[in-house]
Every structure is written in C-alpha cells, then in structure tokens.
Image: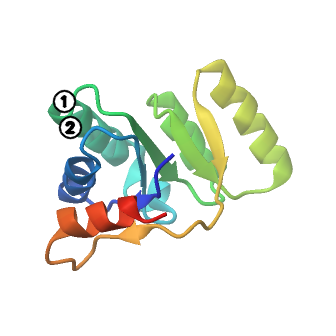
Amino acid sequence: MSRPIRVLCLDDARAALAAADGAPVRLVSAPDAGGALGAGGWRALLDAITAEFPGARITAVLDCGDAAGHALAALALGIPDIAFSGDAAAAARLADIARAQGARLHPADGVEALDLRGRRDPVAASRAWLTQP
C-alpha cells in the first residue's frame, strides 16, 4: 500500500488521487476525526471521491481515537476502514463487528502521513511523497 496522505477536506483527497494516477492510495483522516468531523462527514467525503474517481483504489481510514462510540457510528454508516486506539477489549469487540460487516479495524499506528495543509501545490507534494521509497 502507498504511503498515507492525511486529508482534511475534499480538495486534499482530490489532490492525493490525482497524484496517485491510478495507483492504490491510502488516505487517513486527522487524528480523532471521528469525533471532530464525524462519521457522516467522512462518509460524505468518501462518496464524493468515489463519484469523482470511479475505479480508484482507495483505502480511506477514519481515525476514531479511543472513542468506541465514534467507531460504531462509522461502522453503522458503512465506513470500511476505521482506526481505533482504545483498550484491547473494546478493540476486539469492534474488530468482530467490523469483520461481520466486511470492514476493517486498524490500530492507530502513528505512521507518518503527508499533511497537505498549507501546500502550494498539493498534487506535486502528493506525487513526490508517493514516489519516495
């Protein structure tokens, strides 16, 4: 999977997908976006991106922090990839629910992601990031 790109808005996602040029791309939300943006906001972003880039190979992970309720809300809205950093028992229950729905629960792994905030040319920044070894 490609190096992750943090998306804070629809324009960030567009830039990342334009730079990926058909290659798989991993989009990640801001930390704890499940509470700040909400599952509905992330669902709307995913719907817009998949409509604009049909056939794009996207993994888009919504970070729900340690809030199991936010993760459950995301699963209820059909968000397929969710990061959760709560306790192990809650993570195990959420992982079971996610699997039953064909979704995936990811650990909040702290992997470095390109943040497009303030970039003059987010497509070029994304392209450079994605082509690094």
Is 79 above or below relative to 119?
above
The residue shown at (47%, 58%) is 3
The CA span between labels 1 and 2 is 5 Å
Which of these two is toward me, 68 or 25?
25
Q: Amino acid at mark 1?
A: Ala
Q: Amino acid at mark 2?
A: Ala
Evaluate if marks 1 and 2 touch, with contact meaning CB atoms under 8 Å apart: yes
Which of these two is toward me, 12 or 88?
12
Q: Residues within 10 Å of mark 2 (few under 14, many from 20)?
A: some
The residue shown at (22%, 27%) is 54
Instruction: Determine whether, in the image, residue 107 is placed left or right of residue 63.
Output: right
Instruction: Determine whether, in the image, residue 108 is placed left or right of residue 81.
Output: right
Which of these two is toward me, 69 or 17?
17
The residue shown at (19%, 49%) is 18
Residue 61, given in percent of the width and then of the height, sits at 48, 47
Is 24 above or below relative to 102?
below
Mark 1 — residue? 51
Which of these two is toward me, 28 or 67?
28
Judged from the image, the secondary structure of the residue bearing numbered disc 2 is: helix
The residue shown at (20%, 37%) is 48
Disc sitting over residue 67 in the figure? none
Q: Residues within 10 Å of mark 1 (few under 14, many from 20)?
A: few
Mark 2 — residue? 48
Is 109 above or below relative to 23?
below
Residue 12, given in percent of the width and then of the height, sits at 24, 59
Judged from the image, the secondary structure of the residue bearing numbered disc 1 is: helix
